[in-house]
Image (cartoon, helix red, strand yellow):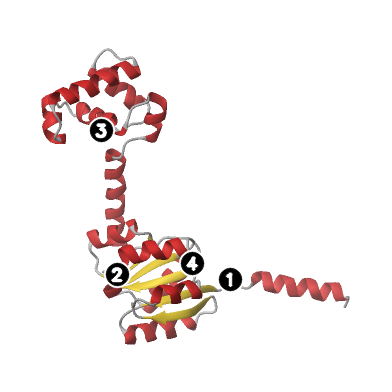
Amino acid sequence: MPVISLNTQEKNVRAEEPRTAAVFLLVENRLLRDALAKLLDNKNDLEIVGACGFSALCLGELVRAAPDVIMIDSFTSTLHGEFLRRLRDELQSLKIVMIGMDADEQSFLHSVQEGALGYLVKDASAAEIASAVRAVANGEAVCPPQLCTSLFRYVARQCKQVPSFHVKVSLGLTNREQQLVLLIGRGMTNKEIASQLCLAEQTVRNHVHRMLRKVGANDRLAVVEMCRMHGLPV
């Protein structure tokens, strides 16, 4: 058989081999840490590149290990806000899986806001853990079915509350002015808006006057309708 054929076969075999994802365990409980290491290191496509509890030195250890995925347990997660921001500055492509968490909406949403792509509750099985790490390493997101609804509700609330960048560009309305449009769309008077936003009523009037001038509208409701046409969820 020609040498070139042998080389081609070898390349095809290598191409079929799954990419190994490097995993770091930042888990305070040693028994859990050892169990996870044993579980994940047995997988052909996963490799444990480090494991430790939280300490002042673990950031440096994590940076040196340069993992694809970091697993953080519920105990360590109470410290994860500022720590994860520093870690992501060092390892921008790092993916985060929270493990042993409560099925609590607030805790879940906070973890998502901090950048977690995986969220595993305390009763997750060994198979679910391995599957979640593998999925997150491949760029997917994982969460318990009972918390999916919370995520959808959160996104819906954000869409209603966050000012639209498109409206800002196309109509020239500031974030504050868009906030006023939302309140006007709810039928609130200038006085009611002023009370809710802790502003002087004259300040609200000035905002409304500037909005009318910017968009070329004759009255408050016309401003609301124009913003609705440009995508603001009024």
Q: Which mark is residue 11?
A: none
Question: Which callout, 1 or 4, points at the residue further toward the start of the chain?
Answer: 1
Residue 168 against residue 48 in the figure, above or below: above
Mark 1 Cα shell of 10 Å, populated few (<14), some (14-19), many (≥20): few
Badge 3 vs badge 4, beta-carbon distance below 8 Å:
no
> Which residue, given by chain and number where applicable, does mark 4 sit on?
137
Q: Which residue is drawn at 54% across and 79% down?
A: 44
Q: Work out how far the residue at label 1 is from the one at label 4, CA to CA, in angstroms.
A: 10 Å
Looking at the image, residue 114 lies above or below residue 200:
below
Question: Which residue carries the number 2 mark?
Answer: 77
Residue 171 drawn above or below residue 11:
above
**Residue for point 49% across, 69% down:** 68
Question: Element at badge 1?
Answer: loop
Binning the other alpha carbons within 10 Å of mark 3 as few (below 14), some (14 to 19) or many (20 upward) gives some
Amino acid carrying mark 1 in the image: Arg
Which residue is outermost to the right?
Answer: 2
In the rendered image, residue 121, in percent from the top left (x then y), is placed at 29, 70
Which residue is labeled 1 in the image? 19
User: Disc 2 vs disc 1: Cβ atoms closer than 8 Å?
Assistant: no
Comparing labels 3 and 4, the label whose residue is closer to the camera: 3
Instruction: From the image, tell me which residue sits under label 3.
Output: 179
